[in-house]
Amino acid sequence: MTRIHMFLASILISTHTILIANTAISENVQSAYTYNPYATPHKWNRFAPHFIPENHPVKEKLDQIFLSSNKRILKDKKSLKKAKFKVIHHEKKKNPYVAKHPEIPGYLFKVYFDSQKDIDDGRYYLYRIWGAHAIRQAINRNCFQEIFKVPRKWIYPIPLEAVPPQEGCISPKNFILVVEDMDIYGWEKNLSKWKSKAMTPELLEAIYILLDEVGLSDTVYAFNLPFCKDGKLAFIDTEYHHDWPVDFMHLARYLCTSMKHYWISIIEREKSK
């Protein structure tokens, strides 16, 4: 299959499935959520098909947290901490904060604050949801469920009754991204796993297939494809997808000598086709 044919096939498959999913979900979501006028109608309508289901236990718990607070939780990092969220990761200025909450185990929350100006959280949330969906399709299509996984992701709209943004706030944030926690190893342990016997020729072949098929240009770094404690590899950064060409050689630096040679042989073999 040529690159252009692979691209068109992936787009058709992804678009068709997303449209079906959106149709099924939006009928429930639209009736379950009350429009929050602090969000633009355009953003609300784009997000609605991806809202966390009304009967999801995480939604119920988040409702309790936001409705019981007498402060604006998304005002800034200090406000988030007062609501018992614990920030566990933040990389760059325009990246979201990744947080956990002790009362909601098994999930991560990615948030932007009102204080973060010029941030399009819509692009961030939607691209990652679409990417996770495309990767999940590819995993299922190739029967790789035993070796790979990707978190489910939903958008949680802040309840209208919660504390509103301060008057004059330039960039109010009214949504957070809910993500399944993949229970990954820490950075150092993950690097050692990549260089260990856990990385096999068969696994490298499967990794190449998914990166190439879905155009995962940002998954050529070990920290975006970490080992999990259940033995699987997880695709945790799903923003960049259907984004070719993929620079496969970036992954070589994380491999032991023998697996590095094997990885290079895969790249050369596929390039010659």
Image (tube, rainbow, N blue to C red):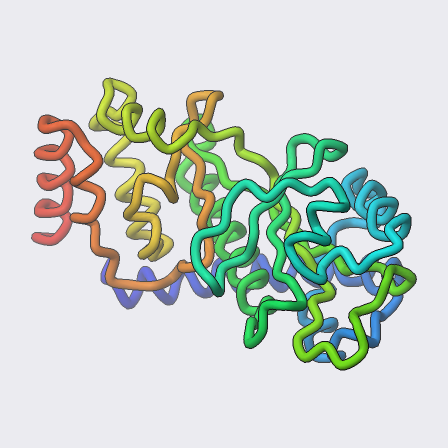
Look at 34% across and 48% down and name the residue there.
219
Q: Residue extending furthest front?
A: 78
Residue 215 place in picture, x, y as percent: 34, 57
In the image, taking residue 58 as reference, residue 148 lies left or right, namely left
Q: Residue extending furthest top?
A: 197
Q: Quadrant of residue 87?
A: top right
In the image, taking residue 157 as reference, residue 32 lies left or right, namely right
Look at 83% across and 51% down and name the residue there.
66
Q: Quadrant of residue 6?
A: bottom left
Residue 224 place in picture, x, y as percent: 38, 44
Viewer-proximal residue among 104 and 77:
77
Look at 22% across and 26% down and name the residue there.
195
Quadrant location of the N terminus in the rendered image = bottom left
Viewer-proximal residue among 190 and 43:
190
Residue 130 place in picture, x, y as percent: 53, 58
In the image, taking residue 99 as reference, residue 175 lies left or right, namely right
Look at 29% across and 30% down and name the residue there.
191
